[in-house]
Amino acid sequence: MTDEAIPFLDLVTVHRDLEGELVDVLKTALKCAGFIGGPMVQGFEDDFARFCDARFCVGVASGTDALRFALIAVGVRPGAIVVTVPNTFIATTEAISQVGARPDFVDVDSKTYTMDPEQLRKYLEHKCRWNTKTRQVIHNATGKPVEAIVPVHLYGQMVDMDPILDICAEYNLKVIEDACQAQGAEYFSQKDNRWHKAGSMGHAAAFSFYPGKNLGACGEAGAVTTNDDGVAQMCRLLRDHGQSKKYFHDIEGYNGRLDAIQAGFLHVKLRHLPPWNEQRRQVAERYNKLFAGAEGVVTLPHQPSWARSVYHLYVVQVEDRARLQQQLSDVHIGTGVHYPMVLHLTKAYEGLNFQRGDFPVAEKAAAHILSLPMFPGLSLRQQERVVTEVLKCLAITSVSEPSA
Ligand SMILES: Cc1ncc(COP(=O)(O)O)c(C=O)c1O
């Protein structure tokens, strides 16, 4: 076994392998100076909608824009409350605040790290009241209406959508999936006995194509998917200064378009996404086997029977995270923490007056989670070294042999 460095994420190899195709995209755009809108954007949108089993895809400039536009397009108004989880990237709550709404939180499930439907129900039953006249949920403490829920398919893992969608239908709430980390993840719905893609289940969904995502651009990019024609149309207006045609502004919007060159790059990469996701699943399975026997010391990711994760991240929990991360870094193994700080205790949200202990599951996870190297192409040999070093640090000597 060598002491080669193992990166947390290898973005170089994939771009070296695709260089020819990506350069062709650039040449095509340069030849016709097609930088904004046009067939490259449309082509990607059509295929990404198809990939997600959604009727519409609207390409935008980032996942944050996608969230913001989706929130506005489904009808979230300034002054409303939008409920999400505390263990997500701040973009989720930034988008909520940026539409003039107030983020609120419910805790997550301890195994999947995603929104716990029971906690959502408790929130609506105990912290809110139902106004039968307006058919609105009113948050008791603030008197504000709760208008939408943003479940986050974190780490490539699906949220348990059946109960979430049922609760939201019962309480007249819009659902925006934050699918930024979950391109291609699937959920098995008991309602119609079939698998559903991330981004096809809520009123709208937001995707990020930040370079490190399962489907990443060579820069910034994002998309909204939806089955609702009106929501798609509104997102198209919002991304382009509210223009229905050049210089005819139906509303004030934003400069939030998907760059044509990025759309071209994404279109090339989209063809590779299914095999890349499959490789990530294999990497996860190999980690699971290599860690067999270390249960109780290393908590592994949990995939419920109703989910097919795309393992954007492979996240374990250990007691002494800081020590393990340092020791892995000492032997040149890259890791990450997603995320070290829960949002309700983050400085930016001091004004919302949350306390430590408000969301104990998310808080506990934040103190112990560690993301191990995960990318398509991570070799068995590299994984064996990662696992050996983890177990060495945790003073476990036996490593089980993988069967494949
Ligand atoms: C869960 C989640 N939501 C939102 C975003 C925001 O996406 P972007 O960085 O493309 O704006 C990200 C990206 O990191 C994310 O991981």
Image (cartoon, helix red, strand yellow):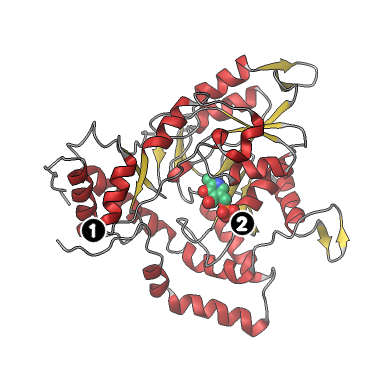
Which amino acid does the dot numbered 1 rest on?
Gln
Q: Can residue 202 be seen in this view?
A: no
Q: Where is residue 337 in the image (x, y as percent from the top left)?
A: 41, 46
Residue depicted at 55% across the width and 57% down the height: 48
Vertical relation: 107 (above or below) 385 = above
Q: Residue at x 59, y 37 (%)?
A: 150
Q: Could you say where residue 266 lies in the image, as x and y percent from the top left?
A: 53, 65
Q: Residue at x 36, y 34 (%)?
A: 305
Mark 2: few/some/many CA within 10 Å (<14, 14-19, 20+):
many
Comes first in the chain, label 2 or label 1: 2
Residue matched to label 1: 382
Residue, far bottom: 31
Find numbered disc 1 in the image and state the secondary structure of the residue it sits on: helix
Q: In this rendering, would 304 be left or right of 226?
A: left
Residue hosting label 2: 62
Secondary structure category for the residue under label 2:
loop
Residue drawn at the location 24% of the way across and 34% of the way down: 297
The front one of 331 and 77 is 331
